[in-house]
Structure formats: structure tokens, C-alpha cells
Image (cartoon, rainbow, N blue to C red):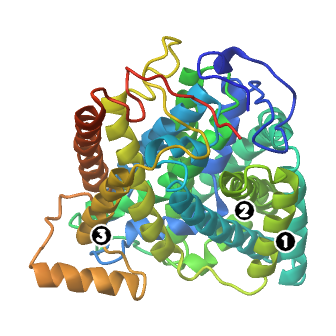
Amino acid sequence: MAVSASSAPTQQGPDEVAPTLDGPVPRSLGLLDQGAFWANLGVSLLGFAGVLAVLEPAGSAPLTIPAALVATVVGTLIGSAMVGLSAIPGARTGAPAMVVLRGLFGGVLSWIPSVLNVVQLVGWGTFELVVIAQAGVLALGGPTWAWVLGAGVVTTALTLRPLGMLRLLRRVVTILVAIAVAYLAWWLFSRPAAADLGQSGSWSGFWAGTDAAIAVAVSWIPVASDYSRHSRRVATAFTAATVGYAITQILCFVVGLAALSLVAGNGDAVFAPMLAAPLGLAALLVLTLRETDQSFANVYSTAVSAQNLWPRADRRVLCLVVGTLVTVLALGVTIDDYSSFLAVIGSVFVPLLGVGVGDALVNRTWARGATGDGRGRADLSRWAPSRPLMVVAWLVGLVAYQLVNPGGAPGWSDAWSALRAALGFVPPTWLSASLLSFVVAGVAAALLTLLERRGASTSSGTATQPGSADQPRRSTPSR
């Protein structure tokens, strides 16, 4: 890859993404392209029922409707800001998300989050095909397997020309989605509620519900740079991700609450009141077809994450393999454990972002990497020196999250609940697991980065750790 941190934001380049990481990086995406992409990701068929994870957070008391609405707004704004932050490194360096982590963990240790990311993206991609199939069967009927196969084929085809997919979203899809969501919102809010949903709840589980809303957004943290690397400007990448995603996730969750109030909180029946609208079938079909942008992002970013492990692998071949895998998995899974899945994801990637921010505050890898002065640049080469202390900071943040909110995943949550009981730790209701883990991981990373620099100065007489101002580092991967 021949794009430097200083020249990348203004370079136009080719029309499409190169097959391997060695190729040039197109810088063709403006605010509308990226804003449409993130806005579409914020609207999800999973989100209409997934708002139940906010209304009835795992391990906490159910919320009232007002509490759930506030938790949705607060959690989405926090989560979207985190996604925006995670888009900055890619826009500065022109590197995809997992390659950026070479500067944080080192070349070999970056394989750890890369593998975890591949696993979670395959899971999300599978979920998306399942929900597309469920919505399709509900709307038009037919066998589930046929919808899964169709969605899998379309998803895989879109990943072969990813920048073309993003331009399509801006020009056509976003307008149709906005009309469909606005219509459904008007219809649902004009119906009398069939159940007093949330009337028996309280505010005591507010931060647990907020964490659930954050978790939906932050699941995109480890892929944001896969797309922002093609942004013309750094500020555009941050703004598009933060604002575009926040607006539509909030709207999606609010519409979901309205639909759930008409079906007595039954998540499995959330689409029924939508189909009852005069134009509900058309609106649901638009949203079902649009859902392929979610599965597209998951499959494409899985392939790009895998390229951090195999840099010379052809992205198109990887996309075909991953697309086939998630299609096969979608033929035999359900989405019953959706909320538990969210809790685990949030606990992993929120502290990961905290580590990146804490390290950047010390090493200035993000803040100074694009100034052209040769200072504060991260080593993103394949065999960049390992930084095990950053992994320690990540684990510290992960532990902080789990002790506050162990979630509801069988086995995993039970183990953390047992540890919390053994320590005699009872988290206060006002404490957010996401915010705590982000801050703890960031502080730990900053302190350990200072320790790295001091140790390097002692052993060599000068600071030589990644990001040192005394030793310029490569800002792009080399092979």
C-alpha cells in the first residue's frame, strides 16, 4: 500500500478497492456517501425487536417507556461517538481497521482482535441473513431457505464492488428507506397501544439499558476504518459516522418500541403491525432489501480483517468464502440469543477503543500522524514490534465491563457473576459498564504507554516505542 498518512486524505485514486492490501487506496468518498452508508446501518430489521434489550436489559429490572427512550438516545449518542472516533485512524492512515491495530498491539498481537472480529462479523452476517429471511417469509411467503440463499447471493455480489455499493446507497436506497421508515412511524404512532408496555418498569436499570443501546452501535467500531480509509477528509469520516448512525438508530428503536406496544412486547411479532398498514408490505419490502447493506458490511469487513492475517489474499476470493459460510450458517441458526450476543460484543470492543484513545493521547499517533512532520506515526508494518502491555490494558477494561454488567450469555455471564459475588462487588445502578470500561482501559493504556516509553529510554537512551516523536514510524503497511 503506497498511501501515506499525510497524502491519503486528498488522493482520489482508482474507482474501486484493490484486491490486496498492497494496492492503492481510493479516496473517493465524501460526506453524503459516508453519511448514507452509516445512516443505512443505523436502520436494521434486528433493531425493531432488538430495542427489547434496552427495555428489558439482561440482569436488570425492566425500564419504563420514558426510561427506555432516554436510554436509547443517551446510549446511541455515546455509541455513535465511539464509532466516529474509531473512523479517524483509517481516514488518517488509509489503513483498514485491523491493520491500524498493528500500531496499537504490534503486528503479531493484532491477530488477536482480528480473529475476534472475524468471529463476531461472521455471527452478525449470519444473523442478518436470518432476519432477512424471516421478514421475507412474513411479507411474501415461500421457504425460508430460498430467502436465505437469495440474500446470501446478493450480499456476496455486493462485496465484490464495495465502493460502488456505498455510492448506490447514497443515490437510491437512502431515499427509499427514509420514506419507508417515516411512513411506518406515522402509522404505528397513530394506533392505540394494545398493551401498557413498560408501565410496570422503573429507572433502576437505566444504565444497563443504555449499555444495550451502546452495544448495538459499538459493534461497528472494529470495522469503521475499513470504510473511512476511503474518505477524502478526516473530519468528514468522523461526522458521517457519528451523526448519520445516531439519527437512524434512535429512530429505528423508537419505531420498534411503538410496534412492540401493539403486540404486547412480543419481539417475534414485531413486524405484524407494520404489515397491517395499508402500504406496510411495500415499506417492509424496502427495509428487507435494504438489510443487505448490513450483511454486506459484515461479509466485506470479515474479508478485510482476514487480510491482516493473510495480506496477499485476494479480497474477492475471501468475500466469496465468507459469503458462502454465513449463508450456510444462516440455514441452521436462530436469533434467540441476540441480546446476549450484544452484551459480549460490547464488553470486548468498547475497552479496545479506550486502549486506542489512551495510547493516542500519549503517543499522538492519531492526532499528529497526518501533520507531515514525521512525528507521532504508528508502525503499521506487518511485523511491527509487539506491545503486550496494550493487551493487558485491553483485558483490564474487559474485566471492568464484565464486573459491572456480566450480561445474560449462558456460561460466560455465570462465570463473571460468580467472580463478582466472590469479590463482594455490587455495582451501583448509576454506573455504566461501557463508560467505565472505556475510561479504565484508556487510563491503563496511557499509563502503560508511558511505562513503555520510559523503559525504552532507559535501555537505549532514547524513546523508540511506536509513536515516539524521536523516531518516525511508517504509517502504512509494508510487505
- The residue tagged 2 is 277
**Residue type for callout 2:** Ala
Residue depicted at x 50% and y 58%: 216
- Does the rendering let one see residue 78? no
Considering the image in quadrants, where does the N terminus appear?
top right
Residue 410 percent location from the top left of the image: 42, 87
The foreground one among 468 and 214 is: 468
Residue 349: percent from left, percent from top: 45, 56
Q: Quadrant of residue 267?
A: bottom right
- Circle nearer the viewer, 1 or 2: 1
Q: Secondary structure at mark 3?
A: helix
Q: Secondary structure at mark 2?
A: loop
Pick whichever of labels 1 and 2 is earlier in the sequence.
Answer: 2
| Near-viewer residue (213 or 48) | 213
Q: Which residue position holds label 1? A: 324
| In contact (CB < 8 Å): disc 3 and disc 1 | no
The residue located at (44%, 70%) in the rendering is: 344
The tag on residue 402 is 3
State the CA–CA distance, disc 3 to disc 1.
34 Å
**Vertically, is 164 above or below 472?**
below
Question: Judging from the image, what secondary structure is the residue with disc 1 in?
Answer: helix
| Residue type highlighted by circle 1 | Thr
- The residue carrying pointer 2 sits among few (fewer than 14), some (14 to 19) or many (20 or more) residues within 10 Å by Cα, namely some
Left or right of residue 479: residue 212: left
In this rendering, the answer to whether 261 lies above or below 31 is below
Tell me where residue 138 appears, x and y as whole percent.
78, 76
Q: CA distance from mark 2 to mark 3?
A: 42 Å
Would you place residue 433 above or below residue 178 in this image?
A: below
In x, y percent, where is residue 46?
A: 61, 65
Q: Residue at x 60, y 44 (%)?
A: 99
